[in-house]
Amino acid sequence: LLLAAYLPGRIKAAAKHPMLVATKLWATAHLLANGNLADVLLFGGFLAWAVADRISMKQRAQRPLPGAPAGRFNDLIAVLAGLALYALFITVGHRWLIGVAPF
């Protein structure tokens, strides 16, 4: 979803702002997995921001964001590149950057 924000296609058309959808999913997943006060404040704050930003986005005039030209394969590129980056981050990056192995 994060990459789909810059690659016009069906994902971007359906989600309107894929980066906010990705932030909401990320925050919700972390809230479900972590329950102490610091985690609730951190991830709950991100979730509240993403929801508030989406609500305010509906009330503003939309201007086009810079990105790649529209193409037939943008959704496929976004999904495959997103899965590759996700796998890399889950297997190596999360432990290195955050200090906690997710699995």
Image (cartoon, grey):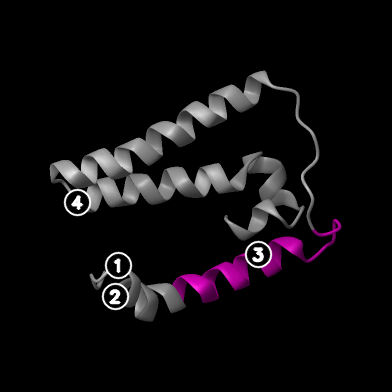
Q: Which residues are magenta?
A: 68-87
Residue named by callout 3: 78
Residue named by callout 1: 98
The amino acid at mark 4 is: Asn
Foreground of the two, 39 or 16: 39
Disc nearest the viewer among 3 and 4: 4
Query: Residue 88 location, x and y as percent?
Result: 45, 78
| Mark 2 vs 4: CB contact within 8 A | no
| Mark 3 vs 2: CB contact within 8 A | no
The amino acid at mark 3 is: Ala
Residue 63: in magenta span: no
Residue named by callout 2: 95
Q: Residues within 10 Å of mark 2 (few under 14, many from 20)?
A: some
Q: Residues within 10 Å of mark 1 (few under 14, many from 20)?
A: few
In the displayed structure image, the side of residue 62 where residue 21 appears, left or right: left
How far apart, in angstroms, are the residues tagged by discs 2 and 4? 16 Å
Query: Residue 78 location, x and y as percent?
Result: 65, 64
The amino acid at mark 2 is: Arg
